[in-house]
Amino acid sequence: MIVAKDLRKRYDDIQAVDGVSFEVYPGEVFGMLGPNGAGKTTTVEMLEGMRDPDSGVALINGIDVTREPMRVKKMIGVQLQANAFFDRLTLSELLKLFGTLYGHSVSPQDLLDRVDLGDRGKSQFKTLSGGQKQRFSIAAALVNAPVLIFLDEPSTGLDPQARRNMWELIKGLQADGTTVMLTTHYMEEAEELCDRVAIVDSGRIVALDTPLALVDGLLETGFRNQRPTREATLEDVFISITGRALRDE
Amino acid sequence: MRVALSLTVASLKMYFRNRQAIFFSLFIPFLIMVIFGLLDFDRFSGADVGIVDQAHNEASAAITLQLTDRTDELVNVELGSLGDETERLTDGEIDAMFVIPAGFDEPGGPVTISATTDERSPQRAALAVALLGQILGDLERQAASTREITDSGGADGPTIFVSTSTLEGDDRSYTAFLVPGIVAMSIMQLGIFGVVFALVQYRQQGVLRRLKAAPVNPAQFLFAQISTRLSISVFQTLILLLSGMVLFDLAVGDGDVVSWLLVIALAVFGGILFVTMGLAISGVARTEEVAAPVTNLVSMPMMFLSGVFFPLDALPGAVTVVTQFLPLTFLADAIRAVVTDGAGITDIWSELAGLAAWSAVVCAAATRLFRWE
């Protein structure tokens, strides 16, 4: 689905992406993990056709992104890190407009239902809560029924309930057969969702495998967690007390 | 095309849902128009009078002296030939013309001074005529008293009269000057301010980035921006002209369809120029904090130096050398020519050429300066 070969991108004096190569297979959820500034967003933007790489090749479904960015953009769904939509248009109007931009006629109601915003069709984007905004931007990324969807830090800034809701949404996308590539700096999110993860640092991929294999690999080196392992985390406590129900409606 | 069209429809929707924007872009020019239209600049200066002395006798010299030699500076007098003064009156340089006929006040000669006034400046013209009447009255009383002494018979001497007529001419009141200027100014404001702030905001919010992620050609987006502003600009031009007609008796050209179409075409033509200028500025000014002073820097000098509120000849000659080439000067002059003089397309070709030249320059700047991010 995605083939990245030796992608490089330099901004002035920073080598943001320094030779990144990987593949994403159809139907999988592929995660890119890394600290802020590791080059995750730049890598994703080069795959989305929003930024030309200095060198290297990016292929989406066999199509060269640099050569035919419009063709690639038509096929993929994109959720950007900072979501922004026009003011003074309702969610339904925005989805219709985006549908036209992609050459698809869409049913705004179906898309909104899919992201649990079925009753907010007449609202404006700026009146939504953080979690609702993220969900809406996923709905906007689905207007062209994409085979591949890019999610850049989809759960950053969300409370635990909204994040779990986002996870369910992403699992639903995968169940529908959509390939997902996401970036995150939450490890539990990567563990929960991703079939495979690439860990990037300073513009390079430093590890790439399934979450389980990566953990096993670390254990084989003799690493042991200093804190005693427990069956539950503080987040589990938080969720069991406050419930799973969304708070932003 | 469908993409550009739906982006246009969407941004028109956004515009008309933004009550504040409508207020500022539609109501403010209207307000300025009404305020300046109500201000009566005629009242503030003395009357300019041209005297055509065909008599060259004692009586005509006395009248001229009475008008010239005043300490109250209510009138400024110039002497000239009938042809010259008629032309000056037609051009609006003088408010009234007094013709003292040959043989005036001489035995058997004519006794009537004809005063022609300019209906564009009724107050000043009326002032001049009133002064003339007063002077003639004084002269007559003097003559009468002299006659009484020399000729005790006290026979009725020839009385002298003023016959007044107003100049038959085009509608050239201040409001007829002002309204087309305001129309031009609001086309500029809408183009520059509307586009700069919308785009700077879209860019800061990241809306432009989201559009870049979609298969949208930049040209489609820009087309939508321009066509939206142009529709609003035409709409606003019509509103301002219609309110000028209602409030100030303005006539658009000869009231024919051609004049209206020409004004609409100028609104579109000027709109393209100033929207493109806005796109160029939005490339330079990356944040709203910078955008506000930069847009003012560009639009303010034009607002006051392009003959919107006052004729350009009110400025020192050296300044007009530059200001006559400002884009807003071309637009204001062209719209004014069509609205006030009923000019046709051939009469305004030099203004159109000026607008076209500016559009080319600004378009080149915009393609170089405009940025998505």
Image (tube, coloured by chain):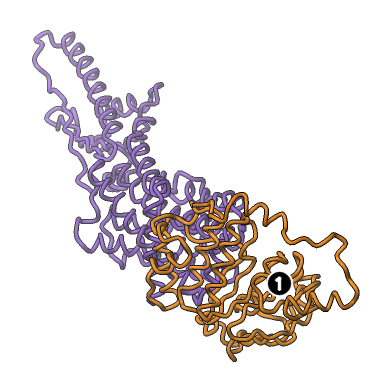
Chain colours: A orange, B purple
- Pick the front one: B267 or A28: A28
Q: Position of residue B81 (x, y in %)?
A: 30, 44
Quadrant housing the N terminus of chain A: bottom right
The residue depicted at 37 percent of the width and 48 percent of the height is B26
Task: Tell me if B108 is positioned left or right of A241 in this view.
Answer: left
- Answer with the quarter of the image where residue A27 lies: bottom right
Residue that extends furthest to the bottom in the rendered view of this protein: A62
Q: Position of residue A110 (x, y in %)?
A: 40, 69
Residue that extends furthest to the right in the rendered view of this protein: A222
Res B372 seen here = no
| Number of residue marks | 1
Residue B321 vertical placement versus B50 (above, below): below
Helix, strand, or loop for circle 1? helix
Residue A220 vertical placement versus B255 (above, below): below
The residue depicted at 63 percent of the width and 56 percent of the height is A160
- Pick the front one: B260 or B337: B260
Task: Tell me if B185 is positioned left or right of A51 in this view.
Answer: left
Res B63 seen here = yes
The residue depicted at 76 percent of the width and 66 percent of the height is A37
User: According to the image, label 1 marks what residue?
Assistant: A40
Kind of residue at disc 1: Lys
